[in-house]
């Protein structure tokens, strides 16, 4: 039942990202599901409200915690962090998702970084998608494991990662590569990213149904510091999807030429090309506060177009950082999407993520950081709550949806 739940999972991942605004998820769950939420769900805490010194992380990644000065002089051989996050997503469309993650990170001589993470989603749903597919409410688990290695020397960086994700009707393998270089006395950073995602899709209870979907992606980014208080970045991303991009459970209902009511499996084009441009601006204001803003435009050859905008204000108060944030999104529907079909067409879908809609998120994050606490170099605690609402302009089955996301995270550095 993965395709019915991608939108909800994307919202949960997006909530994790709101604390450090980055690109929004690509529209259309029928293909957005190919992008794993590894980085989005990363439990690493980011609590600094001081002026950023380096480039923002690439789209879909979270920055590591602010560095803590070592207790003794000279570089440490190994610095280790362990982070855990748990959260609950609940919406008015009868979907609940409980997500737990644990991650570890080791930095060797301030140059080589090794990371690992495990995630589990526990999903229960009786949403409109599930009910209209003549399927009873269900409960399922998704498991995801991530590993990566990186190198940085103050001027250059390189990274590689692998993600494996599996559930009862979906399995994916992701390979990710990235790199960057500082120029102009570290005032400008040029970066790139590439990814390969191989997905296997099947239908629960049907051994004869098996499909595949491959995703090839790349990005280029430029980040600069026009002043000591500002970091501005521009990122262009491109992805190409080839394979099955419909839902194995969803059917489209229409009336044929004789007036009889017919139901046919959902169908979508076998390829999709996506483009996105994102601008992010981070500015240090006053003594202990910062503003993060982002704007993103998206379009694809399915004629979907969208605009995402948002911001966050980080306020430092002693050991605490309080961060109210908001985000808005508006989307135009796919060219072949119709609220009601009157005849059989080559491509037909009732996927609400391919309809026209708007949504909004608003919430607050409270983080506490204490360096040099007993045997720990640092202890971090974070609590975050977000409310959201959707309004669908041309999806008759569900005009609106609203919900709540709550998260709690704990991290330590050794």
Image (cartoon, rainbow, N blue to C red):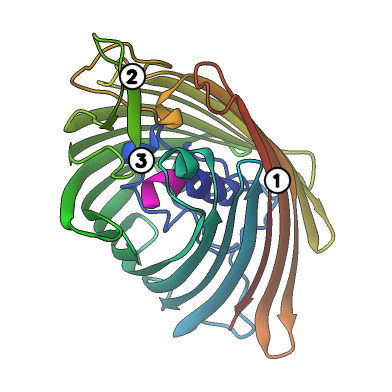
In-image side of 90 versus 336 (left or right):
right
Q: Quadrant of residue 207?
A: bottom left
Judge whether 217 appears above or below 401 on screen.
below
In the image: residue 289, left or right of residue 207: right
Pinpoint residue 222: horizontal percent, then vertical percent. Answer: 37, 35
Q: Between 204 and 153, which is closer to the camera in this rendering? A: 204
Q: Say whether residue 351 is magenta.
A: no
Q: Is residue 312 visible?
A: no
Are there few (<14), some (14-19), or many (20+) residues within 10 Å of tag 1?
A: many
Q: Position of residue 271 (x, y in %)?
A: 17, 31
Where in the figure is residue 170, as x and y percent of width and height? Answer: 29, 58
- Of the two numbered discs 1 and 3 on the same chain, state the one appearing first in sequence: 3
Task: Measure the alpha-carbon separation of dots 1 and 2.
Answer: 38 Å
Looking at the rendering, the stretch of residues picked out in magenta corresponds to: 1-5
Q: CA distance from mark 1 to mark 3?
A: 22 Å
Which residue was labeled with disc 2?
254
- Residues at discs 1 and 3 in contact (Cβ within 8 Å): no
Earlier residue among tags 3 and 2: 3
Cα gap from disc 3 to disc 2, whole angstroms: 26 Å
Q: With respect to residue 339, does 7 lie above or below?
A: below
Residue 219 on image: x %, y %: 29, 39
Q: Which residue shows up at 58% across the image and 52% down it?
A: 16
Task: Tell me the tag on residue 32.
Answer: 3
Asked whether the beta carbons under mark 1 and mark 2 sit within 8 Å of each other, the answer is no
Q: Say the numbered circle drawn on residue 386.
A: 1
Among the two numbered marks 1 and 2 on one chain, the one whose residue lies closer to the N terminus? 2
Q: Nearer the viewer, mark 1 or mark 2?
A: 2
Q: Residue at x 40, y 15 (%)?
A: 340
Say which of 199 and 73 sits in front.
199
């Amino acid at each position: 039942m993965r395709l019915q739940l991608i939108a909800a999972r994307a919202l949960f991942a997006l909530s994790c990202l709101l604390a450090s605004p980055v690109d929004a998820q690509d529209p259309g769950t029928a293909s957005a599901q190919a992008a794993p939420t590894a980085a989005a769900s990363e439990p690493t805490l980011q609590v600094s409200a001081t002026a950023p010194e380096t480039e923002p992380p690439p789209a879909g990644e979270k920055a590591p915690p602010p560095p803590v000065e070592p207790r003794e002089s000279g570089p440490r051989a190994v610095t280790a962090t362990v982070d855990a996050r748990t959260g609950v997503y609940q919406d008015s469309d009868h979907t609940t998702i409980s997500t737990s993650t644990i991650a570890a990170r080791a930095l060797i001589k301030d140059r080589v970084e090794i990371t690992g993470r495990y995630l589990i989603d526990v999903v229960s749903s009786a949403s409109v998608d599930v009910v209209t597919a003549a399927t009873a409410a269900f409960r399922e688990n998704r498991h995801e494991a991530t590993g990566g290695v990186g190198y940085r020397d103050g001027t250059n960086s390189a990274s590689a990662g692998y993600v494996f994700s599996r559930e009862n009707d979906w399995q994916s393998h992701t390979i990710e590569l990235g790199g960057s270089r500082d120029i102009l006395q570290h005032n400008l950073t040029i970066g790139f990213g590439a990814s390969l995602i191989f997905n296997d899709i099947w239908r629960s209870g049907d051994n004869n149904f098996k499909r595949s979907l491959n995703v090839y992606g790349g990005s280029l980014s430029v980040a600069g510091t026009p002043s000591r208080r500002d970091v501005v970045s521009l990122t262009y991303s491109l992805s190409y999807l080839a394979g099955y991009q419909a839902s194995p459970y969803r059917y489209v209902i229409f009336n044929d030429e004789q007036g009889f009511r017919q139901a046919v499996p959902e169908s979508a084009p076998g390829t999709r090309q996506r483009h996105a441009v994102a601008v992010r601006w981070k500015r240090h204001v006053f003594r202990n506060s910062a503003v993060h803003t982002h704007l993103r435009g998206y379009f694809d050859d399915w004629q979907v177009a969208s605009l995402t905008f948002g911001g966050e204000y980080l306020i430092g108060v002693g050991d605490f950082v309080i961060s109210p944030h908001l985000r808005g999104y508006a989307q135009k529907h796919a060219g072949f999407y119709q609220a009601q079909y009157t005849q059989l067409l080559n491509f037909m879908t009732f996927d609400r993520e391919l309809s026209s809609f708007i949504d909004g998120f608003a919430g607050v994050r409270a983080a506490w950081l204490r360096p040099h606490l007993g045997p720990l170099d640092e202890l971090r605690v974070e609590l975050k709550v977000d409310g959201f609402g959707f309004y669908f302009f041309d999806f008759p089955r569900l005009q609106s949806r609203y919900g709540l996301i709550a998260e709690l995270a704990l991290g330590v550095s050794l």
